[in-house]
Image (tube, rainbow, N blue to C red):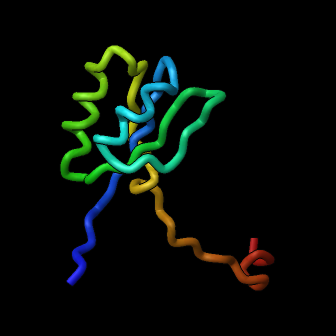
Amino acid sequence: MYKKVERQALYVWVYSLKWRKKLQRYGTISYTSPKMKYVMLYVNSSKASEIKKELTSKNYVKRVALAHRKELDEHYVLKSKDDQGED
């Protein structure tokens, strides 16, 4: 049976996008921005801190940031028309 693996997104800013191929060994590349020179990389959540530490030590990487999507509440509640007029 398929086992679900928790993933974490990393934003990796590089000096040149020619290093994009080297980043593929760390995880799955989801998006590349040629203008801002960053790569969005998905890695296993359990190894995210190790990979971040390893990538920051590389000479072709400017900086690495974790995505905050997991911290956001994705359950929204819509207000009804009756609730808006009670102020």
Foreground residue, 79 or 22?
22
Count of number-bearing discs: 0
Outermost residue, top side = 59
Identify the residue at image location x=47%, y=42%.
Answer: 40
Asked if residue 80 lies left or right of residue 10, the reply is right
Identify the residue at image location x=40%, y=23%.
Answer: 63
Q: Where residue 47 sits: x, y (%)?
A: 20, 46
Q: Quadrant of residue 82?
A: bottom right
Residue 58, above or below 29: above
Foreground residue, 30 or 63?
30
Asked if residue 41 lies left or right of residue 25, the reply is right
Q: Where residue 25 sits: x, y (%)?
A: 29, 41
Foreground residue, 51 or 75?
51
Residue 79, above or below 36: below
Quadrant (top left, top right, bottom left, bottom right) of the C terminus: bottom right
Residue 43, above or below 86: above
Identify the residue at image location x=32%, y=47%.
Answer: 27
Q: Where residue 33 sits: x, y (%)?
A: 60, 36
Residue 77, above or below 56: below
Asked if residue 45 lies left or right of residue 34, the reply is left
Quadrant (top left, top right, bottom left, bottom right) of the N terminus: bottom left
Identify the residue at image location x=42%, y=19%.
Answer: 62
Q: Where residue 21 sits: x, y (%)?
A: 41, 35
